[in-house]
Amino acid sequence: MSVFSSPIRNNAWVGPVTVLSVVLGGLLALSLKEQDRFRREQLPTTRIPILAAKYADLRDTVADQTKQIADLRANLAKYQQAAADESKSAKLLSADLQKANVLSGLVALTGPGVIITLRDSEKKRPNPAEFSPEEYQELLKAYLIHDQDIQAVLNELRAAGAEAIAVNNQRVTATTAVRCNGPTVLVNNIPTNPPVRITAIGDSDTLLNGLKMPGGVQEAYTLTGDPMMFSVEKVKNQTIPAFTGATPLRYAKPASEDKAKQAQTEAEKATKEAPAAP
Amino acid sequence: MSWLPVVGLLVGFIVIYLSPSTIPVGMAPYVSLAAVAGVDSIFGGIRAGIEGKFHADIFLSGFVMNTILAGLLAYLGDRIGVDIFVAAVFVLAGRIFLNLSLIRRYYLTQLSLARKKDG
């Protein structure tokens, strides 16, 4: 006779305990699931209530302000419409304004082009124990996407005639900076993380050739790094979002006519004197 | 018979773990504490059972009240800035260990009795 099947004085407890064990199992599963989620998202559990409140606040602020910007833009469009209806000269002005808006990135644009995706390398990293901390940091650089990698692609796209570019849906405008901010990269002052998806409108083939040419952007990954870090595909049709930030110019203002003329002559002179391309 | 609660625990765990149900982020610590209170009640119930002092009504009400109260008290403590959470974990863990040791002692005694009989 085994110990565990020996007659316990009163077996009435087994039923209720079993029922509540089911409930307890459920409770444990719930909390385990939640803690797993925190671990995945790397939130410290003890500070979750504070972080959650802050996050909600900030998200609401951003949503509010994005909506404000959209509202103001809509108003502006209405005024422009009204002005355009008024007279023929206003119509011409309105067409000019539309052109300027397109060029400055204030309008969403659609067209053919390419999509470039930059990813952090998934290759096995070197063993930190074998290197000094400085050396290891240096080695690790080859495995991660940095602001310079994004800038190199942007530069190449522009050189190949891209007409509109966005980095992870942040429109690249005349005042856009791409810079390193510790673990993240800021584009238009908005943090972004790998994988970085760069969308560009332009002639697909030209853009592709520009990126793939010898000594170009892609070669850096195929020759020395991890080819998986850089991928590019052609698209027939894609839409690039408008710039959603504020666009204040506090220092620059249009030059007066004679100053503009003078700058123009200087520029022409510089072009003439430029050394011929080899 | 004594393995039935273990099966129940596994069944409950698997069902909830595989279901898509989740709880709000802010509630997570309190649910965890409620789970610890539940563990305490279950071991308390087993101990009462093997001591022959088991009463279903005391056990059931104890389980429900303890889990809910533990969560609520910890929440209240957080709101008024007193760390009741830590106090609750301290008390509950102490009781769990005490009950566990009594359950272990009981089964060890049974085992040695059975051996004596065989010998």
Image (spheres, coloured by chain):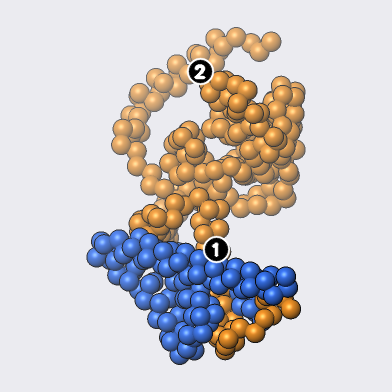
Q: Is residue B68 left or right of residue A214?
A: left
Residue at the image position 50 percent from the left and 18 percent from the top: A268
Any mark on residue A32, and which?
1
Residue A127 image point, x, y percent: 64, 29
Q: Identify the amino acid type marked 2.
A: Glu
Can you identify the residue that label 2 sits on?
Answer: A268
Q: Is residue A64 left or right of residue B100?
A: left
Residue A219 image point, x, y percent: 72, 26
Residue at the image position 45 percent from the left and 35 percent from the top: A181
The residue carrying pointer 1 sits among few (fewer than 14), some (14 to 19) or many (20 or more) residues within 10 Å by Cα, namely some
**Residue B103 showing in the rendered view:** yes
Residue A56 image point, x, y percent: 39, 60
Chain letter belonging to callout 2: A
Q: Nearer the viewer, residue A140 or A232?
A: A140
Chain letter belonging to callout 1: A
In the rendered image of this protein, does residue A4 appear above or below residue A66?
A: below
Identify the element where label 1 is drawn: helix
Q: Colour of chain B?
A: blue
Q: Colour of chain A?
A: orange
